[in-house]
């Protein structure tokens, strides 16, 4: 079976990607430091513990497993944290990615599928965010991801590396079979925090900012189901296997939901009230991030089939209630 090195395979998106890769006939080898990942989320292939910045450990893992491609998920990914302390974002994300790319090149593994983000676009009021939109990140997380995109492009020119770069919008939901799901410690994401508030694990959800220039005053985001998102990654891998050149794809549905709309949908899906407080804006948040592109649908044949808001919340709620979340 063809082996893929999955950095961050013990995390939320990486663990779902490992499941999708396994189902598509690949062997996903997880490389994860377990700083934010969970070893019991590694269920679909071998596990190698290690830090992205550890070149010797990376060489060992490339030599042992001989992957044909890297899916690079491992990263610090919290907008708020990145504004408080950007250092770890540049160190772990940027320096770590450089060490990974160098190790991959030493091993002759030149195919990359990379997790980038709509946060690289920044705050572009009214501009349709397609892949050709100029990138202007407003937080250190987005800046670190844009730097890695630049780095991948540089190594394409110098070493023939090929990278499919996915710019994610907001990822939500959980595996429909309940094998893996979202679990961050500490949790900072809207939907899991809201589910916590709904079942009393937290007193309330705080809405970050109600004075944004949007119809209801709260930020607008484009949510995409994690299963749809990882299905795109398998298509991205096949794109590279077919010998096609590196390419950037947005992964969003093109439909935006305000924070208040997500709250209303959660109340409806769970049939419970959502305790809500209103708080100040969170530094680094863009007003609205909605994908204006259907390039992934047109060129990869991607079809986001579970990304309606109710299905995403229902899948997240089922996972939330399964007890895994209480680890
Ligand atoms: N948000 C919120 N309260 C929270 C967490 C998030 O109002 O406790 C808002 C946040 O300001 C943003 C949206 O929900 O507009 C999604 O935030 P999240 O942290 O889930 O993802 P991000 O957009 O930062 O990747």
Image: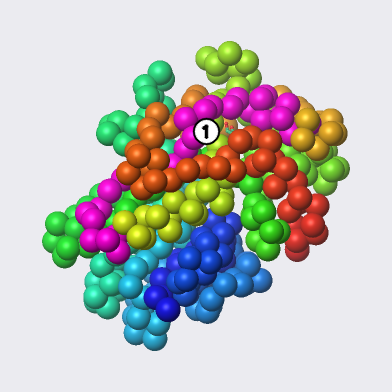
Q: Residue 282, relative to residue 66: is it above or below?
A: above
Comparing 232 with 88, the one in front is 232
Asked if one can make out residue 85 in the rendered structure from this viewpoint, the answer is no
Quadrant into which the N terminus falls? bottom left
Residue projecting furthest to the left: 158
Residue occupying the point 34% across, 32% down: 130
In percent of the image, x 38 and y 42: which residue is there? 296
Where residue 179 sits, quadrant-wise, is bottom right
In the image, 272 versus 301, the foreground residue is 301
Q: Nearer the viewer, residue 207 or 134?
A: 134
Q: Residue 294, position in %: x, y?
A: 38, 35
Instruction: Please give the residue where the numbered disc 1 appears in the rendered image.
Output: 222
Mark 1 lies on a secondary structure that is: loop
Quarter of the image where ligand 1 sits:
top right
In the image, the segment drawn in magenta is 240-267
Magenta stretch encompasses residue 80: no
Residue 318: x and y in percent read 76, 50
Asked whether 257 falls inside the magenta stretch, the response is yes
Residue under the point 82% across and 46% down: 201
Where is residue 19 drawn, in percent x and y? Answer: 56, 65
């Amino acid at each position: 079976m063809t082996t893929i090195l999955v950095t961050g395979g013990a995390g939320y998106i990486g663990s779902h990607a490992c499941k999708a890769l396994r189902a598509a006939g690949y062997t996903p080898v997880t490389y994860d430091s377990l700083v934010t990942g969970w070893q019991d989320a590694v269920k679909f292939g071998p596990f190698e513990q290690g830090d992205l910045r550890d070149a010797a450990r990376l060489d060992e893992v490339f030599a042992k497993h001989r992957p044909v491609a890297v899916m690079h998920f491992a990263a610090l990914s919290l907008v708020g944290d990145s504004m408080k302390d950007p250092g770890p974002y540049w160190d772990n994300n940027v320096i770590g990615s450089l060490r990974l790319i160098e190790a991959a090149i030493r091993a002759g593994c030149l195919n990359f599928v990379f997790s980038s983000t709509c946060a690289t676009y920044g705050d572009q009021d009214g501009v349709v965010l397609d892949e050709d939109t100029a990138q202007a990140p407003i937080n250190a997380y987005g800046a670190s991801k844009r730097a890695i995109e630049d780095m991948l492009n540089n190594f394409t020119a110098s070493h023939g590396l090929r990278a499919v770069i996915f710019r994610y919008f907001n990822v939500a939901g959980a595996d429909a079979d309940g094998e893996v799901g979202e679990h961050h410690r500490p949790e900072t994401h809207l939907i899991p925090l809201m589910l916590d508030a709904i079942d009393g694990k937290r007193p309330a959800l705080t809405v970050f900012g109600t004075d944004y220039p949007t119809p209801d005053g709260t930020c607008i985001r484009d949510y995409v189901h994690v299963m749809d998102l990882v299905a795109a990654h398998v298509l991205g891998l096949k794109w590279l296997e077919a010998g096609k050149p590196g390419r950037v794809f947005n992964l969003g549905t093109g439909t935006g939901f305000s924070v208040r709309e997500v709250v209303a949908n959660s109340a409806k899906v769970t049939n419970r009230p959502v305790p809500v407080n209103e708080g100040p804006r969170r530094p680094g948040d863009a007003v609205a991030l909605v994908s204006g592109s259907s390039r992934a649908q047109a060129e990869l044949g991607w079809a986001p089939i579970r990304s309606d808001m109710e299905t995403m919340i229902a899948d997240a709620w089922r996972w939330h209630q399964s007890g895994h979340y209480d680890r």
